[in-house]
Amino acid sequence: MNLHPFIQALHKQQIGISVTADAVNVSGETEKITTEILNTIEVHKAALIKHLQPDIVPSGNIAVNVLGAITRAATRQLDFSLFYFGNADMYEDANEKYKLLLAGARYGDENGYTAIWTPERHFNEFAGLYPSPGVMGGAIATATKRIGIRAGSVVIPLHSPLQVAEEWSVIDNLSGGRAGIACASGWQANDFVLAPDHYTNRHAVMYKHIEQIQHLWKGGSIALKDGNGHMKETKIFPRPIQPHLPMWITTNGNLDTFLSAGRLGLNILTNFWGSSPEELKTRIAAYRNALRENGFAENHGKVVLMLHTYIAETREAAYEKARAPLIQYLRSSFGLFKSSGNRTEADNLSAKEIEDMLDYSFYRYVSGSSLVGSPEDAIGVLGNISALGVDEIACLIDFGVDTPAVMKGLEHLTAVKKRFTDLQIF
């Protein structure tokens, strides 16, 4: 069978088709995905994988996922936000360093995105543009009117809870009540030059400080020793606008963290780095069960998933533009792991093995674990992710693609966002 006419016919009917090694994903309006179309896909699914993504080796058991005919049980509303994590050496021109941050924030503000996220990263080129989400949040607050302003994340053990609550109260006021923070325990020993005594018990410190931050946010005080050695009850000013500071717990996939967030009624910020889609689905289910067991409402608690994002008109155009920057970006993150002071399997890899691993990582990312590709690819990925129980996609956009191309890619992303929202059934 010549697959070109068949695929073109699907696209004309606004039926999307994308592939991974184990699935052919079909998306579109339910009534348009007929039995005849599904039967054709079933017969030719291995050929479709080879045709649509020749770098993937099909497995022996290939499923057909019908994302347009999503059942009520399998789908949930997806919000879309923009996430920044850019390397410090990404721009040679100093005037370009934060141009994309502000341009993207304004674009997201005007096009219905939920939030802008900026991280806290110290003393390394990887994401080194963002040592202070509070400073970035203040800049975003004055450049936007509606969009949420979130830290992704504040490394809580590095700071006094007073400092965090006070700083984000200012952002809450500047923005008219749009502040929120994801809280991280930290993992890089190098970062803890800022608070060396907190490194070994950083997880316990994080949860203690979270409780104190919320107490301060609500107008309470905490007793701390002043310069004369006296204990002083201390409150924060200015008073925040929101009665409660929205909070997420950041995790690379640790089940205990999902359960702790559920017990406390906090949201989750996560990624695919530490888990497969099926593992993430299991952890989200455990999280929601923990919420229920601790008395929280059915709709309480949101799971945000970070995904690298660059959408072009075709998959080939997206890959051509994104491949070199994303591999370089992944190389930087690899260097961070090697400089962390903790020995890993990476220490034993040769230069060629590292390059092979990075090349594999790129294709793994773009084969269902990212929004790098065509609009049809993105729709397929979003359908799969929605079925995992995710509530929001945090689109990582500043991994090295030039700013004009990223802004053009945001136009494609906005069209995908609208199209996917129109497909959802509730």
Image (cartoon, helix red, strand yellow):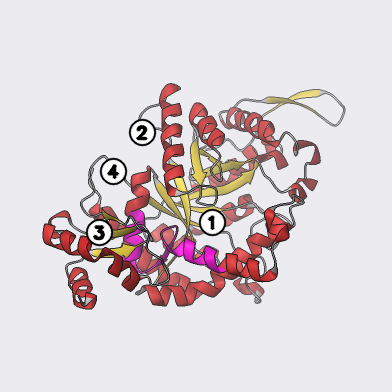
Q: Quick one: SS at disc 4? A: loop
Q: Measuring 70% from the left and 39% from the top, which residue is drawn there?
A: 157
Q: Which residues are magenta?
A: 359-382
Q: Amino acid at mark 4?
A: Ala
Q: Quick one: SS at disc 3? A: strand
Q: Earlier in the sequence, mark 1 or mark 4?
A: 4
Residue 268 visible? The answer is yes
Please identify the quadrant where the N terminus is shown: bottom left
For label 1, the residue is: 140
In the image, taking residue 353 as reference, residue 276 lies left or right, namely left
Q: Position of residue 183 (x, y in %)?
A: 59, 41
Give how far apart the Cα atoms at labels 3 and 1 are. 35 Å
Q: Amino acid at mark 1?
A: Ile
In this rendering, which labeled residue sits more in front, label 3 or label 1?
Answer: 3
Q: Measuring 48% from the left and 45% from the top, which residue is drawn there?
A: 178
Contact, mark 1 vs mark 4 (Cβ under 8 Å): no
Q: Position of residue 72 (x, y in %)?
A: 23, 41
For label 2, the residue is: 299
Give above or below for 422 relative to 162.
below
Give how far apart the Cα atoms at labels 3 and 4 are. 14 Å
Q: Amino acid at mark 2?
A: Asn
Q: Is residue 380 magenta?
A: yes
For label 4, the residue is: 74
Q: Earlier in the sequence, mark 3 or mark 4?
A: 3
For label 3, the residue is: 27
Give how far apart the Cα atoms at labels 1 and 4 are. 35 Å
Q: Amino acid at mark 3?
A: Ser
